[in-house]
Amino acid sequence: MIDFAILIQGMVISIGLIMAIGPQNAFVLRQGIRRQHVFTVVSACFLSDAFLISMGVAGMGALFALNPYLKFAMTGVGITFITIYGGLAFRAAFRPTALDPEASGAPKGSGQSAKAAMLTVLAFTWLNPHTYVDTLVLIGGISSQYDSDPDRLSFAIGAVAGSAVWFLTLGYGAGRLAPIFESQRAWRILDAIIGTVMWTIAIMLTLSLLSEMGV
């Protein structure tokens, strides 16, 4: 039987962990403002979280936590990807694209396919070690406080629901900002912020990796 108090706890904890500004959220926000492949991007985020949360509650977080080489490899790849995307965001800040008021919210000259958007957000999700820490280790660890399977299931359902609520709100809520981004100045500022977020996270990940390696 589902315990709704535990379910709500799982939902609140999940939203609290994933709502921090990061590369994944920044990309979802940008796609939402553009109103471009929002459902595809949101679905990719939600389904990824659902899988990882399920694995964390099932106890797979311990395996990830005990395998430093896997963590080092994923962190290195993630740093590279995030750094490159941050550079692209800064480049876009100097060559901004305004939204066309007559194009139903679609950006001028945009040729990004749904497949490309999905692969990009999946890369932000699966190449970011913070994703595994939040879902496998933290959420999985918190769920271990419950002794019964029904209680752990309630917590997992709540955590997955929290992910769905967050990404749906972020992706589709961002569309309300589209009128603001009809100006190139607004896109220039947003891209500069995204680039700053990406490079800040890349630097933090690099410092953390070097510290764990004893450098």
Image (tube, rainbow, N blue to C red):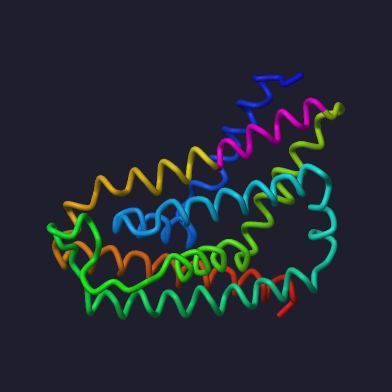
Establish if 21 lies above or below 170. below
**Relative image position of residue 85 (x, y in whole percent):** 44, 75
Establish if 77 lies above or below 130. below
Residue at (22% x, 52% y) in the render: 178
Residue at (56% x, 48% y) in the render: 46
Does the magenta-highlighted stretch encompass residue 124?
Answer: no
- For this view, does 105 lie left or right of residue 14? left
**Relative image position of residue 65 (x, y in whole percent):** 80, 59
Total labels drawn:
0
Q: Tell me where residue 21 sits by quadrant.
A: bottom left
**Relative image position of residue 140 (x, y in whole percent):** 75, 44
Majority secondary structure in the magenta region:
helix
Q: Which of the two residues, 116 or 196, is positioned nearer the viewer here?
A: 116
Q: Tell me where residue 12 sits by quadrant.
A: top right
Segment tinted magenta in the rendering: 150-163
- For this view, does 41 lie left or right of residue 147? left
Residue at (21% x, 70% y) in the render: 108
Establish if 171 lies above or below 124. above
Q: Which of the two residues, 7 or 67, is positioned nearer the viewer here?
A: 7
- For this view, does 114 lie left or right of residue 175? right
Q: Which of the two residues, 32 or 77, is positioned nearer the viewer here?
A: 32
Does the magenta-highlighted stretch encompass residue 151?
Answer: yes
On-image quarter of the C terminus: bottom right
Establish if 163 lies above or below 89. above
- For this view, does 118 lie left or right of residue 195? right
Residue at (49% x, 46% y) in the render: 19
On-image quarter of the N terminus: top right
**Relative image position of residue 68 (x, y in whole percent):** 80, 69
